[in-house]
Amino acid sequence: MSRRPVNPSRRIADAGSIPFVASIQSKSRNSPVLSIGLVVVGAILLIGYCYSNSGSSNDIKDVSKLEGVGSCTAEVLQALPLLKKAYGDSMHKVLHVGPDSCSVVSSLYQEEDTEAWGVEPYELEDVSSKCKSLVRKGIVRVADLKFPLPYRPKSFSLVIVSDALDYLSPRYLNKTVPELARVSADGVVIFAGYPGQQRARGGEVAKFGRPAKLRSSSWWIRFFVQTNLEENETAGKKFEQAAAKKGYKPGCQVFHLKSYA
């Protein structure tokens, strides 16, 4: 944060006009011990501040990996408050499917009356200790989306998927998207990249095995019709209204779908 330059004469004059400050200045000139003491106190306060924020450092590190590469999972993290307004009680039992699911699950756990699980479709590398703990507890699973999800029908109130579908061919999308609808009770929210969106091609090929196939909204709409999935217009409108109030413009395409009856 930039500060306006301060006139030295003004600062001295102001300090001199306040007896307490003037006495401190007088004592600090005469007592080097007091100066050292002030430095020590400042150092202690700084250490305390850093320690108090250490609990969220892993989450911040995880999210920072997603920024700047066109990640829709990072977009989900920003959109969580808006999704809560759009879906209300349907956010009480959520499954997130996609890369870096640990970050989304950790954020959802901070919400009141919300349970969360995750499916990470690719091998986990260089993850935080918090993410490893979620995997050990079975809260986040590593599972190939080309096969059926390991959950019963309507196991979750809401399923949120990000990035993962962009790396699947239509052959596998025909199986995976209906699976997402099968395990949800109140709907599926899909975050997909825009055509032409910038992605880190070298990194994504190494991790996902292929570059992302970013499809247009018209392609997705045709696909939903073919797989008998209906748009959830009510939730979609609520999401758009909440986004407009917050001045939020999604960096990814967001589709709101109904679950199978």
Image: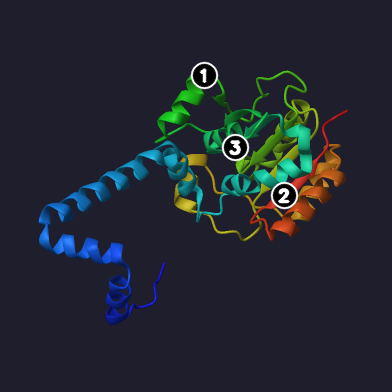
Q: Which mark is residue 137?
A: 1
Q: Amino acid at mark 2?
A: Val
User: Which is nearer the N-term, disc 1 or disc 3?
Assistant: 3
Query: To which residue does mark 3 refer?
Result: 98
Q: Amino acid at mark 3?
A: Gly
Residue 115 picture quarter: top right
Q: Is residue 233 left or right of residue 118?
A: right
Q: Look at 57% across and 26% down and name the residue there.
A: 143
Residue 28 % position (x, y):
17, 60
Quadrant in which the C terminus is drawn: top right
| On screen, residue 74 above or below 68 | above
Is the residue marked by circle 3 packed among few (<14), some (14-19), or many (20+) residues within 10 Å? many
Between 34 and 124, the residue placed more toward the observer is 34
Give the secondary structure at mark 1. Answer: loop
Number of disc labels: 3
Between 42 and 70, the residue placed more toward the observer is 42
Q: Amino acid at mark 1?
A: Lys
Q: Is residue 243 left or right of residue 36?
A: right
Residue 194 % position (x, y):
66, 56
Mark 3–mark 2 distance (CA, rounded to whole Å)? 14 Å
Query: To which residue does mark 2 refer?
Result: 254
User: Which is nearer the N-term, disc 3 or disc 2?
Assistant: 3
Is the residue marked by circle 1 packed among few (<14), some (14-19), or many (20+) residues within 10 Å? few
Residue 175: tell me if it is visible: no
Is the Cβ of the residue at disc 3 closer than 8 Å to that at disc 2?
no
